[in-house]
Amino acid sequence: MAYQVLARKWRPRSFETLVGQEHVVRALTHALSTGRLHHAYLFTGTRGVGKTTISRILAKALNCETGVTATPCNQCSACVAIDADRFPDYVEMDAASNRGVDDMAALLDQAVYAPVQGRYKVYMIDEVHMLTGHAFNAMLKTLEEPPEHVKFIIATTDPQKIPVTVLSRCLQFNLKQMPPGHIVSHLTRLLEAEAVPFEPGALRHIAKAASGSMRDSLSLLDQAIAHGAGKVEEQAVQDMLGTVGDDHLYAVLDALRAHDVQALMAAVDAMEARSLSFDSALQSLSSLIHRIALCQLAPTALTDEFEAARLAPYAEAFDPEFLQLAYQIAIHGRDELALAPDEVSGFSMTLLRLFTFRPEQPAALGGVLAAGGGQGQARQVPAEAPQATSASAPRIPPAPAAVRSPMPAAVVPPLRAPEKSPAPSPRVETPPPAPAPELVKPVAPASSVPDYGSSVPPWEDLPPEADEHAPLRPVSAPAAKLELAAPALVEPPMAAPVSPAVSAPSGAADPLPAVIDWHALQDQIGLGGFNLQLAQHSELLGVSDNCFSLRLANDQKHLLQINRNGAEKLQEALSAYFARPIRVSIEVGEISTETPAQRNQADRAERHAAAVSALRQDPFVRELFERFDATLEEASVKPL
């Protein structure tokens, strides 16, 4: 007997053996069981998902000698003849080659005659979208009111080209693409029945290459059996398909996880030695990153247990932010391959981009600074505050007041007193106290550059807060301190106090106050920009042993990612204010009380509501309402 291809030999012959179209099977079996039979059915879907197969099973269910049933016997003469494609009352017409109005008229002329052998005449029109407009018009009347013994089954891969007048006369069923897991399970059962040795990894490659088509997977399986001399092996299937093996992709991920650029380039050389397609490699890499993200955020979405177990270590090693960035780099790198000098350099440059760009992570619980760039190493902080060396630094006018010793530099986490400089510190004198408060703004050396840019990824613009500096404020003796380029702090002129949150201790040996108003303290320690945002969105958990314990809201943890020096700046400001080394510990979690930002927002809302109420009670505004039917745009109201 001649060899029969697997796609025909293993075509499903009943609804029970149909794979992946449960929604269609349920509707048809219920209709057959209850006798609610429509005269026209439309099956849509891509190639190889079961349109013709369901049509033949439905024809057997209608003409089985045991009666109209959802479970045809597959043994009677009608069922056997339909399977063998020689049943006189089941007609399959290819609309791609019989697309004219004459072909349709000849088919409809035969429809008026009674069935020859079966119970119903079933006309199956495949690729019906290829019919001409006149052919569609010719079949409309018969399709709407056919004889009782006629059933129409039409199938198409492009339902958008079918006229609405035809769609409205049919029951439409959209057949889904086969999930890879269903394809692997079906191929496994088939190979076990055929007694063909196989490797599960090879079937996963075939299922992926089939792109949701069961017929394509069976055709590829036939080719793989022939290529492997009666065996289906993973390496042979990879060579046959010309795809990038998972071992190369996992080698790339292992190198990224180990932060090993040499291993990364070795993976590129191995792929180049095998002449693999780098476009396909980036496509497969982006798909693999997508599945790792699914394993990390939605593990139930992965139905393949073997794949889920293999991806689990990478889901634990990589952060969600890095996976999102890596996915974008992979898909954009694939688009840029055509612009590269050659595919090898374009692919290697994309991997180097993956190696280079790592999103900063938020601070660990109880820590001050986030881990750096995916390597799990904290950035080192200098032990002493940097000394100004530029000759162009602004000079401070002499003043008779005594000079305070240089401010201790903040070290993460414990702070130690600065070492004495060998050069004597200049003494600065201040004029007699002025009667009015003086507005002072921090002075920076001419050569210094704000480090906001270093805290923001290079592909993003700086937010508006990055340009903000410490606001102008009245200087008070117990609260304000002026940070100079030189390593000395100057006592500002005495002025009227500004009601500080807590009184600055007179000496470093005095204990910190038991109760600290964290909200009012922020207005007096001189923070601005991102540093002020970080403090305002944190709540004070407590103060113990010169350590401020803060908790940052979960939805504001990006403030630690884009402002790596924020915790240090806050630590330095508190140390300057209390004239002692202060440590700051920031954790990320749920806010239990109220942050200064929330209090400020509530105050603004209250003042806005009061302003709106005052406007509505104003006689002139009320007259506008009554006379001109005016409305008040509350969003435009700015409270004073």
Image (cartoon, rainbow, N blue to C red):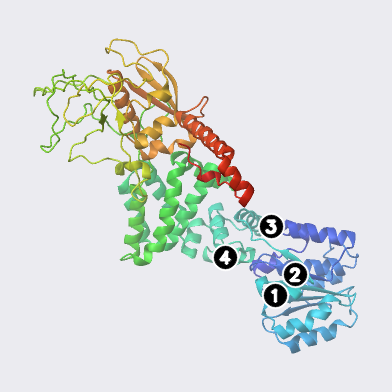
Q: Is mark 4 on a helix, strand or loop?
A: helix
Instruction: Of the two numbered discs 3 and 1 on the same chain, state the one appearing first in sequence.
Output: 3
Residue 251 circle label: none
As measured in the structure, the alpha-carbon distance from the residue carrying label 2 to the one carrying label 1 is 11 Å
Disc 4 marks a residue whose amino acid type is Leu
Q: Mark 4 points at which residue?
A: 220
Q: Mark 1 points at which residue?
A: 162
Label 1 near label 2: C-beta < 8 Å? yes
Residue 20 circle label: 3
Rate crowding at label 4 as few (under 14), some (14 to 19) or many (20 or more) other CA atoms within 10 Å: many
Viewer-proximal residue, 24 or 275? 24
Which of label 2 and label 3 is nearer to you? Answer: 2
Instruction: Of the two numbered discs 2 and 3 on the same chain, state the one appearing first in sequence.
Output: 3
Image position, residue 259 (x, y; %): 34, 43
Q: Mark 2 points at which residue?
A: 42
At x 12%, y 25%, the residue is 398
